[in-house]
Amino acid sequence: MDTTPAPTQITVVVAQARAAKQVREHRLTLPAGATVAQAVVACGWPEFPAESLAELAASGALGLWGRKTTPDHALREGDRVEIYRPLRVDPKVARRERFAQQGAKRAGLFAQRRVGAKAGY
């Protein structure tokens, strides 16, 4: 039986990537039972006021260790709250454009063929 008392404080990290390879992190000490919304507001970043949390949650821009979450999710010790930026380009469209630039002969699975092999193998 574990007799250690429950912690009164937890340490979490709030992270946001403003652009590729530009990640900013803020380590916070919050009371036990704090929520994702409280962590985002406590980090003090001016572009994320308390009023915009509902909008962030609706757009799916909040996550916990790489998985979408809600603002009222309770945090645990060592959690990493992530704020995602919106996609600039649909991934399917970007792939089609890359493929069109590279050409069908040089891209994908069939780029390297053995000499004498049938097309597509």
Image: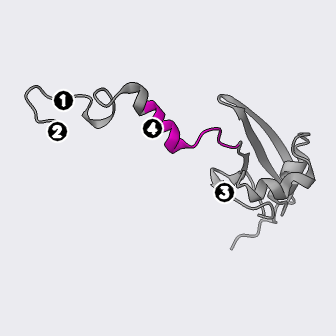
x, y (%) of residue 4? 77, 65
For residue 23, what is the image quadrant? top right
What amino acid type is highlighted by mark number 3? Lys
Question: Which residue is at 69% across, 43% downward?
Answer: 86
Question: Which residue is at 90% across, 48% downward?
Answer: 42
Question: Which residue is at 38% across, 26% downward?
Answer: 102
Which residue carries the number 1 mark?
Answer: 113
For marks 2 and 3, the one nearer the N-term is 3
Q: Which portion, as a residue range, is magenta?
A: 86-98
Residue 30 appears in view? no
For marks 3 and 1, the one nearer the N-term is 3
Q: Is residue 22 left or right of residue 114?
A: right
x, y (%) of residue 15? 74, 41
Which residue carries the number 3 mark?
Answer: 68
Magenta span: predominant SS is: helix
Find out whether the residues at labels 1 and 2 contact each other: C-beta distance under 8 Å: yes
| SS at mark 1 in the image | loop
Circle 3: is it few (<14), some (14-19), or many (20+) Cα within 10 Å? some
For marks 2 and 4, give the CA distance.
22 Å
| SS at mark 3 in the image | strand
89 is within the stretch colored magenta: yes
Which residue carries the number 2 mark?
Answer: 121
For marks 2 and 3, give the CA distance.
40 Å
| SS at mark 4 in the image | helix
For marks 1 and 2, the one nearer the N-term is 1
What amino acid type is highlighted by mark number 4? Arg
Outermost residue on the bottom side: it is 1
Which residue carries the number 4 mark?
Answer: 96
For marks 3 and 1, give the CA distance.
41 Å
| Quadrant where the image shows the N terminus | bottom right
Q: Is residue 60 left or right of residue 103?
A: right
- Identify which residue, 37 or 91, lies in the foreground: 91
